[in-house]
Amino acid sequence: MQVAGIGRIGDRVGIIELGEPRPLADDEVLLEVMVAGVGNWDEFVRTGGWDVGARPPMALGVEAAGRVMAAGRAVSDWAPGDAVMTYPVPLRDQGTWARRLIAPAGLLARKPQGASWEAAAAFPVPALTAEQVLSDTLHVRAGEQLLVHGASGVTGGLLVALAALRGAQVTATAGPSSQQRVTALGARHVIDYHDQDWPAQVRAITANRGVDAAANAAPVGDRLDRTGGAAGGRLATITSDPPGEERGITVSSIYIRPDGNQLRELATRFADGQLEIPVAASYRLADAAQALALVAGGHAAGAVVLTP
């Protein structure tokens, strides 16, 4: 089976030949991958910064959408032909940048009928990340003031939408080209992060009280410290450069965990049109290195996917 992956940690991504998927365990399914997601997290896997359970030579990729081809003896919820999406980490066999994928049945969610394969493939990681930031870490409640820094990106946009659905009063930072979209997702105020005084604008919006919580989805240096978070507030970041704790603000770095129930609940909102995934580019499996370079460089204007 030809996959897009690496022969050794640190290798450039290329097409490599691996064996066909092994026989299924009782709780597993075999998927025909229709589309696989590509994210900057895949660069961490390539360079050895994130252990996803597989060892080189290996296919990269940790999210996908596809059809069930076969199911293990203990699987009763899924049948051949079902259209699903998944974040199957830790990987049981190989990554998602392949034509076939073994995944735990408990980590599948039904693909919304109205969603494209591309959007469904790019949904699991950012959706789970955003939900876990809001529910597990920040514990955002209705009526609270929430800042989402970096709302232009896929995960940032989902943070805005999910927080607004919770009843939070969302202030977001985004580039000028994304302001209309971020407002439509539910942000009450959208600030251009290119403005050097954007932290002061956040303080003005909250009458200098500061926000109750902040979710960071963009590199910040020390500027997020100056947004005037309320004493005792909470800050969660999905980037590698969190600001330091001060004024009693609790800072948490978020690492996504697999959760099939959570993914299925999010898929229901995706199907209802409450959540969206803007897809910027689709590449062939043979061009996986180019796709990864695009997202790792921060130049994608939406989700990037691979079609096996």
Image: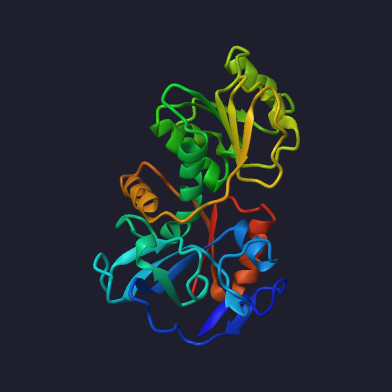
Q: Is residue 34 above or below residue 118?
A: below
Q: Give the side of residue 75 with respect to residue 163, left or right.
A: left
Q: In this view, does 125 lie above or below 289?
A: above
**Identity of the residue drawn at 63% across and 65% down:** 45
Q: Give the side of residue 32 with respect to residue 51, left or right.
A: left
Q: Give the side of residue 190 with respect to residue 161, left or right.
A: right
**Identity of the residue drawn at 33% across and 75% down:** 26
Residue 1, image x and y in percent? 50, 85
Q: In this view, does 163 lie above or below 76?
A: above
Give the total number of marks visible in the rendering: 0
Residue farthest toward the top in the current orientation of the protein:
207
Q: Give the side of residue 264 with respect to residue 61, left or right.
A: left
Residue 188, image x and y in percent? 49, 25
Q: Is residue 148 visible?
A: no
Residue 287, image x and y in percent? 61, 72
Q: In which quarter of the image is residue 173?
A: top right
Coloration of the structure image: rainbow
Q: In which quarter of the image is residue 34?
A: bottom left
Q: Is residue 271 above or below residue 290?
A: above
**Identity of the residue drawn at 49% across and 36% down:** 160
Q: Nearer the viewer, residue 152 or 61?
A: 61
Residue 208, image x and y in percent? 63, 13
**Identity of the residue drawn at 33% across and 72% down:** 68
Q: Can residue 70 be seen in this view?
A: yes
